[in-house]
Structure formats: C-alpha cells, structure tokens
Image: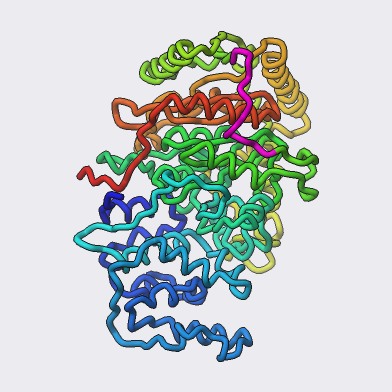
Amino acid sequence: MENVSKEKLRCTIQLVLKDADISIITMKDVRNTLSTLLACDMDHRKHEINDIVRSEILLRDSTTMNTADNRKNNYEQNGTSTDSIPDEINHLSHPQSHHFSSDVTFEDIRKLQAKFANERNWNRYHTPRNLLLALVGEVGELAELFQWKNEVLEGLPDWTSTERQNVSDELIVKDNYCVSNTLTTCASKTLKDFQSPYTSTIIQRLIDQGGIVIGKTNMDEFSMGTASWGYMGPVVNPWSLKTTEKHIAGGSSGGSAAAVAANLVPISIGSDTGGSVRAPAARCGCYGFKASYGLLSRYGLISLVNSFDSPGIFSRTISDIVLTMNAMAGPDEEDATLLQKPFEHIELSGQNEEKKKIVIGLPEEYDIESLSDEYRSCWFEVIDQLTSLGYEIKRCNLPYTKYSIACYTVLASCEITSNMARFDGIKYGYRTKNVEKGATYEQILTKTRNESLGERVRGRILAGNYFLREENYDSYFVQSQKVRRAIVHDYSTLFSTGNIDCLLAPVVSDDPPTFEEYQNTNEIFTSDDLLTVGVNLAGLPALSFPVKLSKKGFPISLQLIGPFMKDKQLLQLANKICSIFQFPFLDLTKDDS
C-alpha cells in the first residue's frame, strides 16, 4: 500500500477528536517520548493510558518505557501477585532515550492487542476514556513512534480491501452512546466529566462479536445541529484536506462519518433523529444507514427525541453495514419500543433474484428550490443509468412532505424539553459554583444551564416549553401529531398501493459550506431538512450512498428510502444499485501536496 504523509495522518486523526487540547500537540511532540504527550494537561489520565497495554507493544527494540513502574504498581494495587506480572513489564528499564523498531506494523499492534486483552483487563482495555486516548494514543502516536521513515508511514490498514466475516475490527462510537466506564459527553459541557456506568445494548453486542471500540467521536451538542460543532469544537470534513479552507462534516454524527470517510476505521456508529447519519455520510463520502424505528435497540443511547431517534451505521461498503446490522439487531427487553421478535439475518451473497421488475419512485417534493443544478443533474443522471439497466422509474407525490419541517420542529422541541429536564446539575453532570450559599433550586438550575448548555440547546428547550403551554398545546403539539400521521400515511400508501420498492432522492442540496459560511447563515440547512426529516417522522429505513465528486471535489450523494421494516430488502436492493457506481473514496495514502 502507498505511504501516507505525516501531516495528513495527523490532520486526519484530529478530524474526529473530542478533546480540543489535541490541537496544541504537534508531530514533533508526538515523536518525543510518551511523557511529552501526557504533559499536555493530561497528568490525571496517566493511569488510564497505562492500562492500555502500551508497554507490551513498545517492547520491540525498546530499552525504555517510563510508565513501567506505574503499570507494576497497578498490578500490585489490584492484588495481583508479582509472579503474574508479565515479564515484559518487569524487564523494562528507564533510560532517557527510546529506540523503536522500524518494522513494527499495524498488524503487529493488533496481534499484541489481542494477546493482552485477556479476561483480567478486558473491560479496561475496551473502554478507553475518549478518542484522544484511544485513537491518537493507542494508534496514531504508536504509529508515529514506530514507523516514520523519510516523512511517511508504512502499514496503514486498508479496510476496504478485506472481506470481513464478522465485526472483529476496530470501530468508533458517537459520543451519545453509553460505554461502561467511558466518558460520555454528548459534546456538551454539561456532561464533560460524566462516565457511563453501563454499555448500550447495540455497542455491547458489537463487543461480544469481537468488535473493538477504540474511541468516541465528536458531534453536535446533544445531537442538535447540522455541522457536528459542539462544546469540543467542530469536526472538519476530511475532503477539506485537499482544499485551503475547512468545511463542515455535516451533523449531528459528523465525527463518525469523518472517521470512516478518512479510513481510520471500517465501521462507526451514529444516531439519526432528522438525518443525522445520512447527511454527514453524504457530505463525507461514505455509506450511512438509518434502520427502521424499532429495529435496533435504543437502550444506552442518550435520547434526543425518543420517537424519532434511530441508531445508524457508517461504512465504506454495504457488506460491512449488513455485518453490523446482523450483530446489533434483535429483541431487547430494556427497550419497550423495540420489535420483540428474532431478527432475520440479512444475506447479500446468494440472494434469490426476483423476477419482478424493480420500481423506484422519484418523489416530486424532494426536488427542492435550494437543490443546486449540479446535484439535481447528478440525481437525473443516476435515474437515466438505472432506466438503461432495466429499472422502472416512477414519479410520485408525498403531499404532506411540505409540512414535515414544521411538524418535526414542534414535536422534536417538545420531546427535547422533556429529555433535557434531567440535566439539572443536581444528580449528575456540570453544576455551577457561581451561586451564593442558600441559593434555591431554580437559581441553581438557571445558572447551571446558562453556563453549561449551548445557545441552540437552550433555544430548543424554550421552544418546547412554549409549544407545551396549556394555551398552545392543541394548536401546536396536537396538530403536529395529526400532520405526522398524515405523513406516515403518505409513505405507507405510496409503498403499498403504488407498487414502489424504494424511493430515490437527494440527501443534501449542495457542497458542504466552510466554517465561516456555516456561522453566517442557517437558511440552507433549514431547507435541507425537507430531504431527511420525513423519513424519521415515518420511521423508515434509508441509506445514503456516494455517487461521484462535485466540481469542487466534494462527494455528491443520494439516498434510497424503503418501506417500514423492510431493511433487508432495502439493503439487498442498494447492494445491486450501488455496485453501478465507482465512487473514488478518499485516499489519504496519496500525497497530493
């Protein structure tokens, strides 16, 4: 495999970090000893890093590791006999310089990870506190220490070249999923120090299948946004590495999308409440799948809008999405909204070829005014390609779609108000210290929320309270519920009586804006919601897939939308359709500078 430049790897790793302090760490810092990295305001995390089995990995040709004594102390404090301490740790010495082997590869690292991820340290090893420790600390810095030769890194794994039979590779999780003993912040100051006491159902199932959770990704605060720009700072679109400006990655699961697009991991997990998986997947150039509501357990997913939230999957291949779905889906008594019956595993290979002609619907309402000419042309080009291959294209209508944004805004705000009530600084999370002794609960709550919640989050809470006021309840909340039922009826009628197998539509209307453009206007994102929120209102499965690059070099993507609980059929159909396109996935191993 070709080599990747140091700067590109460093920038890539930074794309999805939750910890803003990483921005001050240079490649020169990284090339120094591990203690240099730890000195960057991370002394309180040393014991966590010591538990990630660095000593064993760095043993090759290494005559030093200044954390060896700490690791020995950890074993002794845990009541472990000194006789059972690995010889590698006992034999480490502490001179001032390090000597690392030049032939250590990522495969070596993975083998050593598996060797030492035994029952004794399994939980600690698989629950790193955040992406700074897990991704940069466990992979990026180790690679930097091992293999910089003439300004390049050799051995960067090529995830897309491997046909996997299970989810036994590294994966990354959006920071609104609980992972035991791991920081779960939702990119908010409110939860900046919160460690989850348990692991969410779907993440635990991936771990049980051999998946290795190496970190948590950045997002919009509490998933409220379209740019993955929260308390920890923004996520940079990985395609921006080829430009002079930074562009947004989309939201709210932008960190998870960027990680897969940059080929850091083969699989990442996000959540989709109003397009939060499909939109960032479209902007970053990877596949983003939102499952039917009630098919994947939401237990351990910090709720934004309970009736809309759906777990989602990012990958560069549909086969990896299917593997992940098969591992995660199934009954869960912890989630009352889940379909409580065995999940029929999805098979892509050897599937029966249907004799009937596939009918693809084109919803007129998705041809929105803000859709750029280039993106509209791409949509129609794909239609022509599918027609030439024998697919039947059928134009159709979803009359109530035009009300979907207003309906979504009201219902989402109402549920957000309810869900955010728990973050009061009393039971857990951030609590203000800027109140006088004897302050009332209301005073503490007001001060705490003003200091710890972003403007967008506070605005949603206020809006929800307004819609739920007694004098407004019938006019807003009740009417929005009626509109939602009409939207659900539109989709179900279209699929059942219109003989349509799936819908083909845009996901976003244009290339991702720069950070500056995003901060100056929000109109484009409001109109883009029309392309995504209807699917959440109806609880349908949908897949965002990249087609080609725009003139500016950013991915142009479309989405396939299927009938409720027809995820298997949608993914099988998508596997056929997407094989038509040869999308040039981002390759950071090629240095274009």
Q: Position of residue 245 (x, y in %)?
A: 28, 40
Q: Which of 303 and 288 is in front in this view?
A: 288
Q: Position of residue 51 (x, y in %)?
A: 52, 74
Query: In the rendered view, does 94 fall on the left or right side of 168?
Result: left
Q: Position of residue 44 (x, y in %)?
A: 49, 74
Describe the colour scheme in one phrase: rainbow
Q: Which residue lies furthest to the top in this view?
A: 395
Above or below residue 15? Residue 144 is below
Q: Nearer the viewer, residue 29 or 515?
A: 29
Quarter-wise, where is residue 343 in the image?
top right
- Residue 233 belongs to magenta span: no
Residue 444 seen: no
The image shows a total of numbered marks equal to: 0
Q: Residue placed at 30% from the left, 67% from the top?
A: 103
Which quadrant does the C terminus fall into?
A: top left
Residue 324 seen: yes
Q: Where is residue 242 in the image (x, y as percent from the top left)?
A: 27, 40
Q: Which of 278 and 273 is in front in this view?
A: 278
Query: In the rendered view, does 385 fall on the left or right side of 323?
Result: left
Above or below residue 510? Residue 310 is below
Above or below residue 473? Residue 422 is below
Instruction: Provide the residue span drawn in magenta.
Output: 345-358
Above or below residue 170? Residue 558 is above
Quarter-wise, where is residue 564 in the image?
top right
Please identify the dominant SS of the magenta region: loop
Q: Residue furthest bottom?
A: 82
Q: Residue placed at 28% from the left, 68% from the top?
A: 102
Query: In the rendered view, does 471 fall on the left or right side of 77?
Result: right
- Residue 351 belongs to magenta span: yes
